[in-house]
Amino acid sequence: MRLVIFSTRSYDQDFLSRAAVAAGGRHELRFLPARLEVATAAAAADADAVCVFVNDDLGADVLQALQQHGVRLVLLRCAGFNNVDLEAAAQLGIAVGRVPEYSPHAVAEHSAALVLMLNRHLHRAYARTREGNFALEGLLGFDLHGRTVGIVGTGRIGACFARVMSGFGCRVLAFDPQINPECEQIGVRYVELAELLAASDIVSLHCPLTPQTHHLIDAAALATMKHGAMLINTGRGALIDTRAVIGALKSGQLGSLGIDVYEEEGDLFFRDLSDHVMHDDVFARLLTFPNVVVTGHQAFFTADALTAIAQTTLANLDAFADTGRPLHPVSTERLA
Ligand code: NAI
C-alpha cells in the first residue's frame, strides 16, 4: 500500500523505515515534514493511507479532502485521537487506526522526572552550578515520601505512574470513572475529583482529552487545590485552562507546574524556533516562571516507545491491506 507520512522528523523516518523493512517491505512509504491540514492534504494524492501525529488536523474538511484523493485509512502514530473527527471519518468510509499502547513507562517516567525536577529545582541547579554558583537559596524541596499524589485517569499510563510514585512512598489517590483493580491492589484509593484536588500535594493528569475533560483544571478547580500544590500535565494541553493556571501561579495558589503538552502546541512544538520571536504571549508568560518546567511533548520519546510505535503502525497497515480493518481501530463506539 502507499502510505504518506505527515509531520515527519528524522526519528520518525529512522524507526518507520526500519519497521517497514522488518515487516517485509511490502508497502511504499513517503515521508513529508509538513503538518497535515487542508492546505497540505493534496500531498496525499494517490495514497491509500496517511500516517499522522498528535498535532495533525483531521477535522471533517481535511478528511473530506483526503477521501477525494483516494485515502481510505488514517494511521495515528500515537495513542490519543482527540484530533480526529471520528464521526466524519465514519461517514466518509475512512478507517482510523492508532497505537493504543507503546510504552506507558515512557510517559509515566517522564511525569516522575517533572515531579523530581520541580521539587528539587534541578532546572535551576543545573544552570547555577555551570555558572559557578553553588548557593542553595531557592532550591529547597520536600520529601516525596509520605506526600499525597492525586492521579486523574488510571489507565495504562496513570497506573504505571501510580506504581512509580508508590515506590517513593507516596500516598496515592485516584479519580477515574473506571476503577483499575491493579491500582487498588497496590493501595491506590479511589475518590471523587473534588477530594483528590483538595487533598493532593501533587496532581498529575493522565486522562484523555474529551469534551468532558476539556479544561478539567480551570480557575474553580485550581481554587480548591491545596495551596502551593504541584500540577503535572503530560496528557493533553487542553486538560488545563492555561490562563487560569497562570493566575494561580501568580497568586501562589499553585506552587509549581510541569507540562509536556500545551493547548496551542500545534504552532510551537516539534521544531526549533530559537531564532524566532514568540507570538504566543500566554506561552511566553509561562516560560518566565521559575517554578514552571515545560517540555515539548517529549514524554513518549524513548527508543523503546518509537520502536513499538513503528511496529504497531506497520501492523495496522498490514492488517488493513489484508482485511480492510486496521489491527487497532478507533471507531465512533469509543466515544459512547
Ligand atoms: P488509557 O485509555 O489507557 O487510560 C485513560 C484513562 O482515563 C482510562 O482509565 C479512562 O477511564 C480515564 N478517564 C476517561 N475520562 C476520564 C475523566 N473524565 N476523568 C478521569 N479519568 C478519565 O490511556 P493511556 O494510554 O493511559 O493515555 C492517557 C493519555 O495520555 C492519552 O489519552 C494521551 O492523551 C496522553 N498521552 C500523552 C503522551 C505524551 O507524550 N505526552 C503519550 C501518550 C499518551
Image: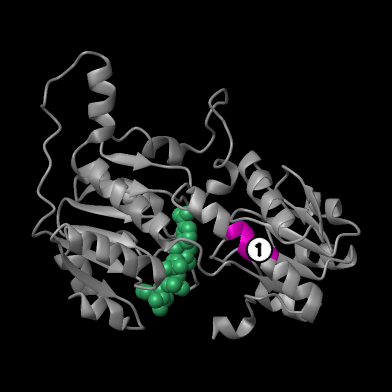
Q: Quadrant of residue 177?
A: bottom left
Quadrant (top left, top right, bottom left, bottom right) of the N terminus: bottom right
Q: Can you see residue 87?
A: yes
- Residue 311 lies in magenta, yes or no? yes
The residue type indicated by label 1 comes to: Thr
> Is disc 1 surrounded by few (<14), some (14 to 19) or many (20+) residues within 10 Å?
many
Residue 261 in picture, x, y percent from top left: 45, 51
**Which residue lies at the image location 84% right of the left edge and 50% below the top edge?**
43
Residues 202 and 287: in front is 202
Quadrant (top left, top right, bottom left, bottom right) of the C terminus: bottom right
Please say if 241 is above or below 180.
Answer: above
**Residue furthest to the top:** 132
Q: Quadrant of residue 168?
A: bottom left
**Which residue lies at the image location 25% right of the left edge and 39% below the top edge?**
291
Residue 303 in picture, x, y percent from top left: 51, 48
The local secondary structure at tag 1 comes to helix
Q: Give the side of residue 184 with respect to residue 102, left or right.
A: left
Q: Give the side of residue 76 with respect to residue 239, left or right.
A: right
Q: How many marks?
A: 1
Residue 87 in picture, x, y percent from top left: 68, 78
**Which residue lies at the image location 73% right of the left edge and 67% below the top edge?**
317
Residues 43 and 193: in front is 43
Majority secondary structure of magenta residues:
helix
In the image, the segment drawn in magenta is: 309-314
Residue placed under numbered mark 1 in the picture: 313
